[in-house]
Image (tube, grey):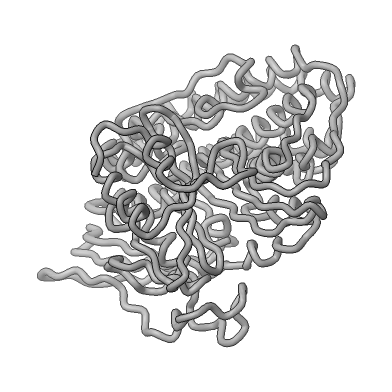
Amino acid sequence: MMGNVTLLEFLSMGREVAGHRPWPRYQLDGRSWRRLAEQMTVSNWEILAEWAEPAEVHVLLRGEDSGAIAVASHPCPDGAFFALGQVRPVAIRMERAIRDLWGLVPEGLEDQRPWLDHGRWGISHPLGRPRQYDGGRRPYKFLTAEGDGLHQIPVGPVHAGVIEPGHFRFHCQGETVVRLEERLGYVHKGIEGLAAGKPIHDAARIIGRVSGDATVAYSLAFARAVEAALGLEISARAHWLRGLFAELERIANHLFDIGAICNDAAFAIMLSHMGVLREKLLAANHAIFGHRLLMDRVIPGGVAVDLNEAGRQTLIQLLPVLRRGFKRAVALYDHTPSLLDRTTGTGVVHGTLAHRFGVSGVVGRASSRSVDARRMPGYPPYDDLDFIIPVLAEGDVHARIEIRMEEVRSSLSLIEQILLRLPDGPIQAALPLRSGEGVALVESFRGEVAVWVRVSETGKVVRVHPHDPSWFQWPLLEAAIEGNIVADFPLCNKSFNCSYSGHDL
């Protein structure tokens, strides 16, 4: 281990890969990769994503103190790599997924169970059958809990609603949850394999559907990664329209989540109020931009649709309607003691755990972690807009609701600023034909979405990896429910609102 060394100083011992933008990528040999893991035991560096190729593993890192970002890569000619999950527990599930997808063995990782493969892939592996692959053929053993009077409650993977599948194994003592373990991966779509070899704009449509409720965020992250790889600068108007779409998406999701959390506490009227407001916003999206969820509105090179004066006036008139309705709904929440009794002190995520897992978004900000990709590393148009990043320390369901409420108010203000100051100019730029690698980090309503891409000089995607913030949030849900009663799990679960689809790719 080295002393007080920065992330970039440490990684510079490796070979810098040419054409990787906007942040550098370094290839480390086996010894340097192991030293990276050792250094992470004393350095406050966080993992933002970890993924692989047939014979190489990559990790996106941020020096949390300095904000420096870089990719470290490790070629694995022998089919194995030193597991970073030994020093950063947030990497455990990602490294289990890497073994399933590519057959690269995370050496030293205690948990070698499969993650994505449920024994159904057979010979039709989604990315080709990797070396040393035997994932789903091994029996899956849930972790156990021991003690007098314990019993298990299995829930899922098929649920009683329209939500996507996931299995939850509860160990309980009476009504109190002693341990929860999740098993996910039921909606694995092989996104990376589907996008590989596609023209850039075709791949953009695929990445924009990783998690449908965050389609703007994923489209934006992919577009920014491609533009970085190609060294392409787009117009200010395109940047500002992207910001408008992102904030509209953020409000729509936060409104629904606030209502749905309250609905899980049997306070259905809150869901009704929020549903009405959300519908007004989605209807405006469709009328102005042609799609309720703004799918495929952000594209590499800019945006697919412009905002005319009539649309701008429609949004300007909608803002006070949303503000008034939201204020009434918040007052209803604040003055309903029986509802507050269910949300306050329930499902606590302590700040130390939030920092240890590097969790972002509402879950992180409700537990004293103030990261927001719009501010750090930052990207247009947010570097020219005024907004706050709300942070609370309580870490309970109530705090996560309060963060969402404050973010709705902030997003309404951001939209107003954009509508009043939207610059003129073109909305699209042609994509040059050149090869390169790029990575982007953007803020979705859930937290930080990362996308890494390699493109060829023929305008096609060679490799792409999208990363959802839910990778870091799902494990904390297991910790949040511990010591709570089973009946509070829906409240905890919805207050997190992790993505099944985005997590499973």
Q: Which residue is at a point 58% across and 25% down the rendered structure image?
A: 326
| In the image, residue 41 above or below residue 399 | below
Res 229 → quadrant: top right
| In the image, residue 74 above or below residue 243 | below
The reply to whether residue 215 is in sight is no
The reply to whether residue 99 is in sight is yes
Closer to us: 427 or 252? 427
Image check: 10 left or right of 189?
Answer: left
Q: Which residue is at a point 49% across and 75% down the rendered structure image?
A: 117
Q: Position of residue 106 (x, y in %)?
A: 37, 67
- Location of the C terminus (image quadrant): bottom right
| In the image, residue 413 above or below residue 360 | above
Q: Position of residue 328 (x, y in %)?
A: 55, 23
Res 231 → quadrant: top right
Closer to us: 200 or 255? 200
Q: Position of residue 162 (x, y in %)?
A: 59, 61
Closer to us: 113 or 12? 12
Q: Which residue is at a point 36% across and 74% down the rendered structure image?
A: 113
| In the image, residue 296 above or below residue 108 | above
Image check: 405 left or right of 384?
Answer: left
Res 175 → quadrant: bottom left
Q: Residue furthest left?
A: 148
Q: Which residue is at a point 68% across and 32% down the rendered structure image?
A: 248
- Location of the N terminus (image quadrant): top left
| Count of marks, rendered view | 0
Closer to us: 401 or 221? 221
Q: Position of residue 464 (x, y in %)?
A: 64, 55
